[in-house]
Amino acid sequence: MTQAPAPAADPCCFVIFGASGDLTSRLLVPALYNLAATGLLPERFAILGVARSVHTADEFRQELLDALQAHATREVDAQLAQRLVAHATYVSGSIDDPETFSRLRATLEEIEADAGTQGNRLFYLAMPPDTFEPIARQLARAGLSQEEASGAPWRRVVVEKPFGTDLASARALNRALLEVLTEDQIYRIDHYLGKETVQNILLLRFANGLFEPIWNRNHIDHVQITVAETVNVERRGRFYDRTGALRDMVPNHLFQLLALIAMEPPARFEAERVRNAKAEALAAIRIPSEAEALANSVRGQYRAGRVHDEPVGAYRDAEHIVSGSVTETYAALRLEVDNWRWAGVPFYLRTGKALSARRTEVAIKFKQAPIAMFEQTSVDRLGQNFLVLRIQPNEGITLRFNAKVPGPVLAAESVDMTFKYKDHFDVAPSTGYETLIYDCMTGDALHFQRADGVEAGWAVVQPFLDAWSKAGAKGLEFYPAGSSGPEEAGFLLARDGRRWRIIE
């Protein structure tokens, strides 16, 4: 089937706060180049960097080109790269200084006159979370983010995760942003939602008649969501020791995957309807008491070990980690979704650093078929039926089912039927940000979190945060770097007669 090409985005100026940071050089610049290479950037496009460091416009353009050469996911065409940065310029200053925003306003007006971006502005806050509110307020005071009633020209603000550090801070941040912006202007970005397999979950579920009828408590035994990382905290100790695995990964990455698996089918494939369904799924998760949170969770911290045969020191020995820190680098939760579709189906979530393999997947375990008809044969057991959605690496989908082993004796064995994106589609390597940045420019909020969804997620996480804080060092389990995590995590499933899939 021939696919109609996606239209280029509206003319706009892409304003990056934190333009000299790692996120900009490693991900945003290569993503913009990939969009340009596929014809999805508008002809009238400009980049405006904002940061404390002092640069001329020429120096900033060269910095963008250097970042592209260092981090591009495809071969760089020099002429295309030059066109991308042709209208790039720079404003130096602190976000606490109103003069910075006065200079920003003057520079934007010059760009809009010169590059013809029609007043459309996309402000990307590639900055720490505590800067989101002050930047939004300064933009409003300077008259940079207001839209006319018609919404043209448009003004949009992109904020990175983590969106809050607990329920109270998430609510406070939502209130603060909504005092100076409308919900339609706020794009809470989670780069996991730009990955093809994540976006394919909606199509897999709702475009295939063979899956939707069995996507419920009558046929599904349980769901496992895994985000395993081999990396340790590296140089992020100061940030990570205040955050931990639960805050860093669960309310955003893991809950967005859970929402896509658990949501009800929207009446139409429209952003607001899809986001309504996702928010309702998150709101349906049973909020545990603190005692229930302790009973249905495991937190761990890595000790010294070896990952891929490379030595890794203990978390507590890493740079900027507080002595005797009880911050978790591994978290596993057992959750339930209290609605008609999922009643009684446990959702097991786990995430951790310095584990044996890098893997992100959603595994749906179907209920066991009756074995009664095979009682008079040599088949004494049946393998488990799993549908596995692999997000990274090697994006794809695997269906595991039972098949007869060739030969005169009736014997069954589990086999895999696997689809990999790289085998079927000619897809160029990407950063994961391309689709999301394009959606920001076209005003499609389908893959972005909304305030109510964010708060629903934090409401579930809060009892775990409170219970773990009160428990302190008690209950913190340790695991060697390069393992699958603490052994105690297996008990969450073993007591239900289940087990984790192997991380490999």
Image (spheres, rainbow, N blue to C red):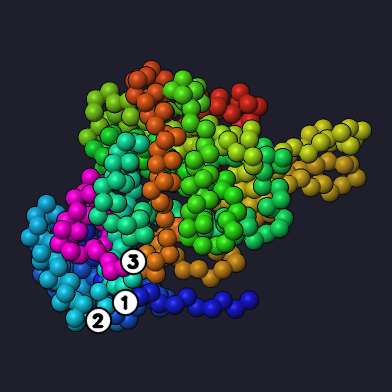
Q: Position of residue 236 (x, y in %)?
A: 27, 42
Q: Which residue is mark 3?
A: 30
* Residue 327 to residue 269: above or below: above
Distance of label 3 from label 2 (alpha carbons): 23 Å
| Magenta stretch contains residue 144 | yes
Q: Earlier in the sequence, mark 2 or mark 1?
A: 1
Name the secondary structure under disc 1: loop
Q: Which residues are magenta?
A: 122-149
Distance of label 1 from label 3 (alpha carbons): 19 Å
Residue 294 seen: no
User: Where, quadrant-wise, is the C terminus in this rendering?
Assistant: top right
- Direction front: furthest residue: 149
* Residue 360 to residue 268: above or below: above
Q: Is residue 97 left or right of residue 69?
A: left
> Which quarter of the picture shows residue 378?
top right
| Magenta stretch contains residue 44 | no
Q: Is residue 460 left or right of residue 319?
A: right
Name the mark nearer the viewer: 3 or 2: 2
Q: Which residue is mark 1?
A: 11
Q: Position of residue 435 (x, y in %)?
A: 43, 64
Q: Amino acid at mark 2?
A: Gly
Check contact, mark 2 vs mark 1: CB within 8 A: yes
Task: Name the residue at 51% across, 49% down.
Answer: 278
Q: Earlier in the sequence, mark 3 or mark 2?
A: 3
> Which quarter of the picture shows residue 70?
bottom left
Q: Earlier in the sequence, mark 1 or mark 3?
A: 1
Task: Name the residue at 36% across, 59% down.
Answer: 184
Distance of label 2 from label 1 (alpha carbons): 7 Å
Check contact, mark 3 vs mark 2: CB within 8 A: no
Task: Name the residue at 59% across, 29% down.
Answer: 493
Task: Name the residue at 58% across, 35% down.
Answer: 338
Q: Which residue is mark 2?
A: 116
